[in-house]
Image (tube, rainbow, N blue to C red):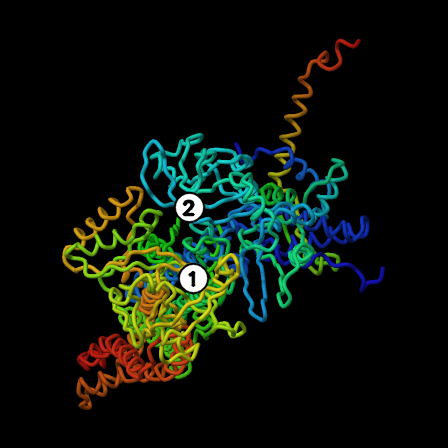
């Protein structure tokens, strides 16, 4: 074996040992191990020797390895300072670091308080946002096979018009499981809509949203059942599974297995075969009852229509793939399977793809949530855009807090230069000083973390109520959140502590003791940059808050084209309430406090789906336009106070084929004067696709009798779309609401009277009503919530930035005590001195404003583009934010400046 | 008295140090004991024992020469002190007395 090729002991093991071992043992132990290694390498071969080396190192781990010699005379010992060993292995030093850290912190109470307050704020924001984000990002992850569950998405292009729909057919679900090997199982859901679900022992009319599911549903997903068996609960016809909430509402307890329920869509009673736990808050599913699909399967109608369809979109279909399957391949297999069974019309392109369960919450933009009745709300979606923004903000606030700490401790450093000098000349090594500063930083971060944890738990109820979640932080919280929290805290502590630690420990002791000053120019410029940075962010956030506030205000107060105040919208739920509407309406109108009553299929500011239709002038079937359609009676215009621009209103049932158009729709057909022009409506939207209005495929022919002024019948986020007001007796959409304009006085009495009229006509009718203005506000609730959040974040950043500024002002005035003294002696006035001392900082804030304005202008501009109707950015919004920032900065700094300017120069010049 | 009491492994290590006399250091002890006991002896155990023996004053140590084999590091050589020798003698005496006290019939009596 040549000399060069001689194998060497494992370097990592050597380093590890050298690091851990006490200095007086290091040499001999490493030597011993080397010797053993070489012997073994010769006798037993290199790999074995290497392995045994590691084993020996492991077996050496024992307190004796790192304990220092029991010799009392540490000073005179052969190895006086063993600083190369990590400090946490030497309890004496650790104790010393902590003691010194506590002493330093308690000596500078102001700085400590500023630091802890800043970091606490930062960590609190970070934690709250972190909890929110974690909840959003783990949607639907609680199913044990969540990674293998996919939703089937249908993509259809008809003559260049694309629709993407989260729905598929009965057959697709039934056959794909049998013919595609990679699919383990499939399940179908259909949200059939609202109906009365009644406990016969205690009949109360209450509309429940009912969902149908096949027998596989509960075995593919893991919705935990309190009672019942998940494999058989949905197997039998006339079975229903309900959740705890519904069980409590219907029966008053949850021990309801085997009880029966009356369901208004079916003759036979349903038997409760299972009770589900309530949904977790981060579940996309919100059903509270599941009726077994088998209930319907036996009827001939069902067999012939629904169950034999390949191309319909009546079901939400979920597939469970086998492990290690590529979803892309299965998608194309699905497409092929369907195309083998349906022949799409020419010009129609049909394809299917699989969407992962975990993507449903955040990645469903552009996908219509199909397979639901028009009165079922779509699955709630999260917004990836806001998630990114929040993530950014969380990191930012935390970063700013860290910067603050760094800033303050560097600033304070000059007061500690003497201390460091003395320590060094006694024999402290650089690494010991670094540890000292790091321990201080960690101590501060840990204290802040504890404070932040308390604060978060205090704030969570408020936070929850406005993000509409049920977040908690406690022992039960997911371990990943704790890991993230601890990681972030340690990182902040180490990063923000490392700069002062490295900077301060590097100076020469002689210079320090001679009274060296840290070069104020160099380090100050860094601090200036940091202050500018903090104030830039604060100003941008402030401008964002102002803009959003005005936008939300604009949306809530702008003239919608109709009068939304004092309008009560009453749902029509039963057939009787619908058929006898003439009498009901007449009775309602007789109440003295009722001004007007109208019946409609939908109302402006509608929260459910408004039906759309395709229409075209007669004979021009190619010139199809899509328009919304609302069925309304002759009192509609009067009740909603919508302006009729031209033509006439509906008069009597003879107008059943008349329509009013809004201005946008009229422009679409180039109508300026309504004079009974004919239009044809061949198809209407149905679950994401268009279906013929009449079974015999003939179009519904209407005449335009009037044009109404455009009004915002949808949220202000959307442009005003074309709208057709058809007579309430139309084949497209029957009446669903009574809208009553009432007097502002005695609202509750009026409501009682309305209820008695409705229930006199039909005792089964649950009296469901909404105030339209409140419903409209719901559109902008999300924006209002974001506004609140933004205000808080802006406040937090301003607060933190002010803490930093205050600390810096304190420091810089302290540094300039002598200068102020000299100036005063020479005759400077208090005011001029205060201005001088504050001026520097105000200049920084001005610079920050200069940077913040263009950024804010661009960001808020982009953001307002999301709103079809929005305010314009105005100069005063920027000016206001700038002035507020200046004012806050001035107040922060002036306290210190004025204090310094008032000091008697004798005192400041006496020393030295 | 706990200080002078010798544990079994301590006694073995102390004897090995005496045996190796001029070249008694940890690796040599590890090998010596490993061969005689016919089982691997860990360096850690030997080290700790030697430290304990030194704390009890039973051995003295000094640095020996460095060698390339050891990566240029010195070894720590041990010698048994007077107290150490006394402790060994004492242990041996105790054993001898015990041996002498065993009745002849105790071992293998009935097989005769």
Residue A803 picture location, percent across and down? 31, 70
Are circles 2 and 1 on residues that touch, CB within 8 Å? no
Q: Residue furthest front?
A: A654
- The chain ID associated with circle 1 is A
Circle 2: is it few (<14), some (14-19), or many (20+) Cα within 10 Å? few
User: Which corner quadrant of the image does residue A554 belong to?
Assistant: bottom left
**Is A268 situated above or below A614?**
above
Query: Which of A274/A529 is in front?
Result: A274
Q: Is residue A831 left or right of residue A517?
A: left
Callout 2: residue from which chain?
A: A
Where is mark 2, residue-wise? A475
Looking at the image, is mark 2 or mark 1 earlier in the sequence?
A: 2
Q: Which residue matches tag 1?
A: A611
The residue drawn where x is 33% and y is 77% is: A871
- In the picture, the quarter occupied by the C terminus of chain A is bottom left
Kindly identify which numbered label has been placed on residue A77: none
């Amino acid at each position: 074996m040549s000399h060069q090729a001689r194998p060497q002991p494992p370097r990592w093991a050597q380093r590890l040992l050298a690091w851990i071992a006490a200095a007086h043992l290091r040499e001999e132990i490493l030597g011993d191990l080397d010797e053993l290694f070489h012997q073994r390498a010769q006798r037993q071969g290199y790999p074995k020797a290497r392995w045994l080396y590691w084993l020996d190192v492991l077996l050496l781990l024992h307190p004796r390895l790192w304990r220092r010699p029991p010799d009392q005379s540490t000073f005179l010992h052969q190895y006086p300072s063993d600083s190369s060993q990590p400090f946490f292995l030497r309890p004496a030093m650790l104790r010393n670091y902590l003691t010194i850290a506590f002493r330093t912190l308690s000596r500078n109470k102001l700085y400590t308080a500023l630091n802890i307050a800043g970091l606490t704020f930062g960590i609190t924001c970070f934690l709250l946002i972190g909890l929110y984000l974690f909840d959003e990002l783990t949607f639907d992850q609680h199913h044990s096979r969540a990674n293998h569950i996919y939703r089937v998405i249908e993509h259809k292009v008809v003559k260049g018009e694309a629709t993407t729909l989260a729905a598929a057919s009965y057959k697709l679900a039934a056959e794909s499981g049998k013919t595609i090997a990679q699919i383990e199982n499939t399940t179908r859901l259909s949200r059939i809509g609202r109906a009365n679900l009644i406990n016969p022992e205690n009949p109360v009319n209450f509309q429940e949203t009912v969902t149908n599911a096949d027998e596989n549903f509960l075995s593919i997903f893991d919705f935990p059942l309190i009672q019942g068996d998940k494999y058989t609960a949905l197997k039998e016809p006339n079975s229903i599974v309900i959740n705890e909430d519904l069980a409590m509402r219907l029966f008053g307890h949850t021990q309801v297995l085997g009880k029966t329920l009356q369901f208004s869509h079916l003759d036979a009673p349903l038997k409760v075969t299972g009770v589900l736990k309530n949904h977790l808050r981060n579940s996309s599913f919100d059903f509270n009852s599941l009726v077994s699909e088998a209930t319907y399967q036996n009827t001939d109608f069902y067999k012939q229509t629904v169950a034999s369809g390949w191309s319909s979109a009546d079901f939400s279909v979920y597939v469970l793939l086998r492990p290690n399957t590529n979803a892309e391949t299965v998608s194309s297999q699905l497409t092929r399977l369907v195309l083998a069974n349906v022949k799409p019309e020419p010009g129609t392109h049909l394809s299917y793809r699989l969407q992962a369960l975990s993507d449903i919450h955040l990645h469903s933009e552009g996908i219509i949530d199909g397979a639901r009745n028009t009165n079922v709300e779509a699955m709630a979606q999260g917004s990836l855009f806001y998630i990114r923004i929040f993530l950014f903000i969380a990191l930012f606030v935390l970063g700013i807090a860290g910067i603050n700490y760094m800033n303050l401790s560097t600033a304070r450093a000059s007061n500690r230069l003497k201390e460091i000098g003395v320590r060094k000349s006694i024999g402290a090594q650089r690494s010991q000083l670094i540890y000292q500063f790091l321990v201080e930083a960690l101590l501060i971060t840990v204290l802040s973390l504890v404070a932040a944890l308390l604060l978060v738990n205090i704030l969570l109820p408020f936070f929850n109520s406005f993000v509409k979640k049920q977040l908690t932080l406690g022992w039960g919280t997911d371990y990943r959140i704790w890991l993230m929290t601890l990681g972030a805290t340690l990182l902040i502590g180490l990063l923000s502590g490392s700069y002062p630690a490295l900077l301060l420990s590097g100076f020469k002791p002689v210079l320090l003791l001679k009274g060296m000053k840290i070069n104020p120019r160099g380090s100050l410029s860094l601090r200036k940059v940091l202050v500018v940075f903090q104030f830039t962010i604060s100003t941008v956030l402030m401008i964002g808050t102002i803009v959003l506030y005005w936008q939300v205000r604009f949306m809530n107060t702008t003239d919608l084209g109709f009068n939304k105040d004092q309008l009560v919208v009453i749902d029509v739920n039963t057939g009787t309430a619908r058929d006898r509407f003439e009498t009901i309406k007449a009775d309602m109108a007789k109440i003295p406090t009722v001004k007007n009553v109208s019946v409609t299929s939908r109302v402006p500011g509608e929260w459910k789906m408004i039906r759309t239709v395709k229409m075209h002038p007669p004979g021009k079937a190619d010139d199809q336009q899509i328009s919304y359609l609302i069925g309304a009676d002759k009192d509609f215009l009067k009740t909603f106070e919508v302006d009729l621009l031209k033509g006439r209103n509906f008069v009597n049932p003879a107008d059943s084929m008349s329509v009013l158009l809004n201005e946008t729709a009229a422009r679409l057909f180039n109508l300026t004067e309504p004079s009974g022009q004919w239009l044809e409506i061949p198809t209407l939207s149905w679950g994401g696709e268009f279906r013929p209005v009449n079974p015999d495929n003939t179009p519904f022919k209407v005449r335009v009798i009037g044009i109404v002024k455009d009004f915002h019948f949808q949220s202000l986020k959307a442009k005003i779309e074309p709208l057709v007001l058809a007579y309430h007796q139309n084949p497209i959409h029957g009446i669903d609401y009574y809208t009553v304009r009432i007097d502002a006085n005695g609202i509750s009495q009026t409501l009682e009277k309305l209820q008695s009229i409705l229930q006199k006509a039909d005792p089964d009718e649950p009296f469901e009503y909404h105030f339209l203005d409140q419903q409209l506000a719901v559109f902008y609730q999300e924006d209002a919530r974001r506004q609140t959040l933004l205000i808080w974040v802006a406040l937090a950043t301003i607060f933190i930035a002010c803490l930093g500024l205050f600390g810096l002002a304190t420091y810089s005035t302290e540094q300039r005590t002598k200068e102020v003294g000299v100036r005063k002696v020479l005759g400077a006035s208090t005011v001029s001195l205060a201005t001088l001392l504050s001026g520097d900082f105000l200049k920084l804030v001005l610079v920050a404003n200069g940077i913040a304005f263009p950024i804010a202008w661009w960001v808020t501009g982009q953001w307002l583009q999301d709103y079809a109707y929005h305010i314009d950015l105005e100069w005063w919004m920027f000016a206001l934010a700038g002035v507020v920032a200046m004012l806050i900065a001035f107040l922060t700094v002036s306290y210190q400046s004025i204090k310094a300017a008032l000091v008697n120069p004798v005192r400041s010049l006496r020393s030295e | 008295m706990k200080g002078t009491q010798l544990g079994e492994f301590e006694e073995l290590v102390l004897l090995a140090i005496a045996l190796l006399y001029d070249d008694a250091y940890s690796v040599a002890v590890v090998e010596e004991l490993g061969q005689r006991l016919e089982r691997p002896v860990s360096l850690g155990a030997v080290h700790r024992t030697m430290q304990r023996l030194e704390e009890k004053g039973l051995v003295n140590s000094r640095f020996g020469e460095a060698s390339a084999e050891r990566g240029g590091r010195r070894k720590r050589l041990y010698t048994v002190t007077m107290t150490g020798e006394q402790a060994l003698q004492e242990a041996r005496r105790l054993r001898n007395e015990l041996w002498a006290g065993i009745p002849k019939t105790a071992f293998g009596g009935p097989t005769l």
